[in-house]
Image: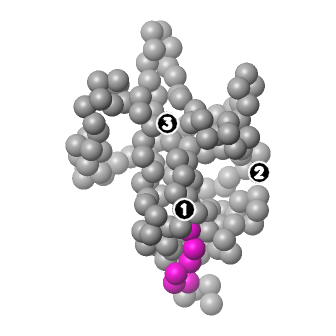
């Protein structure tokens, strides 16, 4: 299980881009809009790699638009979940508000109210945002009963 420190302010997926002699990660506007980050401030970041299976890597290459490929992949990746989707997740930790947090593809976070670390519920995705989704439990983990 991954421990997430309480000082974690934000988590999102981004592509590393080369610009001249520098490498840049673009921060989604929603992070500023939600108050997680403030322009001009300095933050400590952590970088998590996501190994894709050969099928996922092929899917990702074939779903990139010619425009995003020409830009060097500067378009932010789309969320790996959709509203109404049902999937099994594993709750890794609890967030500041007491909700369960699960990670899916590319480290994308799904927030599940009432879930506890170690639970493995089946959830339905209720709301999808650029960097996080909210879900509700549709079938509880039998171990949690």
Residue denoted by label 2: 6
Q: Label 3, on which residue?
A: 14
Residue position for label 1:
127
Residue 53 at x, y percent in the picture: 30, 51
3D distance between C-alphas at marks 3 and 1? 20 Å
* Residue pictured at 38% horizontal, 46% vertical: 51
Q: Is residue 33 left or right of residue 139?
A: right
Q: Secondary structure at mark 1?
A: strand
Magenta residue span: 135-141
Q: Nearer the viewer, mark 2 or mark 3?
A: 3
- Residues at discs 2 and 1 in contact (Cβ within 8 Å): no
Q: Name the quadrant of the N terminus.
A: bottom right
**Disc 3 secondary structure class:** loop
**How far apart in space, not on screen, are marks 2 and 3 (Cα)?**
22 Å
Q: Of label 2 and label 3, which has the lower sequence position? A: 2
Q: Is residue 94 visible?
A: yes
Q: Which comes before the other along the chain, label 2 or label 1?
A: 2
Residue 36: percent from left, percent from top: 71, 41
Q: In the rendered view, tell whether residue 76 sits above or below residue 92.
A: above
Q: Which quarter of the figure has residue 97?
A: bottom right
Residue displayed at 53% across by 28% down: 25
Q: At x 57% / y 74%, what residue is drawn?
A: 136
Q: Is residue 137 above or below residue 132?
A: below
């Amino acid at each position: 299980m991954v421990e997430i420190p309480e000082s974690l302010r934000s988590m999102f997926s981004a592509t590393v881009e080369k610009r001249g002699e520098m490498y840049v990660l673009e921060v989604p506007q929603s992070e500023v809009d939600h108050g997680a980050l403030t322009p001009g401030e300095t933050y400590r970041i952590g970088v998590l790699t996501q190994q894709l299976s050969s099928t996922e890597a092929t899917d990702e290459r074939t779903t990139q638009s010619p425009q995003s490929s020409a830009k060097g992949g500067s378009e932010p990746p789309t969320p790996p979940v959709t509203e109404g989707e049902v999937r099994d997740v594993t709750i890794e930790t609890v967030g500041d508000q007491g909700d369960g947090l699960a990670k899916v593809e590319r480290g994308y976070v799904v927030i599940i109210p009432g879930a506890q670390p170690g639970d493995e519920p089946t959830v339905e995705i209720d709301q999808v945002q650029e960097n996080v989704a909210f879900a509700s439990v549709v079938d509880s983990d039998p171990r949690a009963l």
